[in-house]
Image: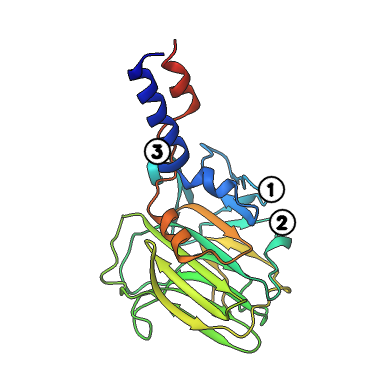
Amino acid sequence: MTSTQTSRLAWLIVSCLCFITPSLVIAQDEHLIAYWRFEEDSGSQVLDSILGHDGIIHGNVQRMIGGGVGGGNALEFNGIDGYVEILDIADFKFNNTSATIMGWVQLYDDVNEYRPFLSINSDVSGDDFFQFAKARSGLYEGRVFMEVHASTNHLFALSLSTGASLDKYTWIHFAGVVDVDHGKVRLYMNGVLQDAENLTSFDLSSASSVTIGSTLFLSGDEYHHGALDEVAVFNRALSASQISAFANAVPNEQATWSDIKSMFR
């Protein structure tokens, strides 16, 4: 092996292990319970690459072939009736255990529209629920927020940016951490802490639904208008540095094993 080959090999290995994708890092986390990459090219099924929490597409949801984060695929929602229903939800019935939910989102419209990203349960049943969304203008000024509705508290964590100043048609990394051990809910955007609120309980043991791109309300269902990609759920609280690492990495392999082997052909 020449010195040039050795240098190239070292660079490629470092790229594979360090610079690339959270997709490889995420998949190695034993606390990861769901990871929807939306890499399917067609069909109505959405696959979970971890524990088989597969979903079914309802309504008008389009596949963005090559338009996702890092050049992969993603899902595009029409804001009218499109969403993904997750079929097996047993692992999402958190009962005073920590959780982290994160992914990438594109927003297509202005401050005046409510746009949900992910919801566990809803307020239709009157039970506790969790949701990640962009609020309408008014009280929450069109901000991205995460909401935890529990028996002993009802709280919102809000982004610093209003809906009017959020970038449109641009991938934004969002992450919500429910840290039961420290009694905190934290919201991050693009790896930066936006808000932290006190938490007294987090019980979703009665949850009956998990949806991506929609949420159910007594006043009527709501739907996301934009795109979503690389949505992951952990049953632990990720640290600020871990959130930042995922937000600043591109979920797409920059160097593959085939690249390494090709040097010796």
Query: Closest to the observer: 67 or 248?
Result: 248
Q: Locate residue 59, reporting x and y percent.
A: 53, 54
Q: Locate residue 231, reporting x and y percent.
A: 52, 55
Residue 49 falls in image quadrant: top right
Q: Which residue is painted at 56% across and 65% down in the image? A: 100
The residues tagged by marks 1 and 2 sit, at their Cα atoms, a distance apart of 8 Å
Q: Which residue is at the far front?
A: 3
* Label 1 CA crowd tier, 10 Å (few <14, some 14–19, many 20+): some
Q: Locate residue 252, reporting x and y percent.
A: 43, 40
The residues tagged by marks 1 and 3 sit, at their Cα atoms, a distance apart of 24 Å
Q: Is residue 77 above or below residue 259?
A: below
Q: Is residue 97 above or below residue 168?
A: below
Q: Which mark is residue 52?
A: 1
Evaluate if marks 1 and 3 touch, with contact meaning CB atoms under 8 Å apart: no
Q: Which residue is painted at 58% across and 46% down in the image? A: 27
- Secondary structure under tag 3 reads loop
Evaluate if marks 2 and 3 touch, with contact meaning CB atoms under 8 Å apart: no
Pick whichever of labels 2 and 3 is earlier in the sequence: 3
Q: Locate residue 119, reporting x and y percent.
A: 57, 67
Residue 96 falls in image quadrant: bottom right
- The residue tagged 2 is 88
- Secondary structure under tag 2 reads loop
> What is the quadrant of the C terminus in the image?
top left
* Label 2 CA crowd tier, 10 Å (few <14, some 14–19, many 20+): some
> What is the quadrant of the N terminus in the image?
top left
Q: Which residue is painted at 59% across and 62% down in the image? A: 211
Specify whether residue 227 is in view.
Answer: no
Query: Closest to the observer: 191 or 159?
Result: 191
The mark lying in front, picked from 1 and 2, is: 1
Q: Which residue is at the far bottom?
A: 152
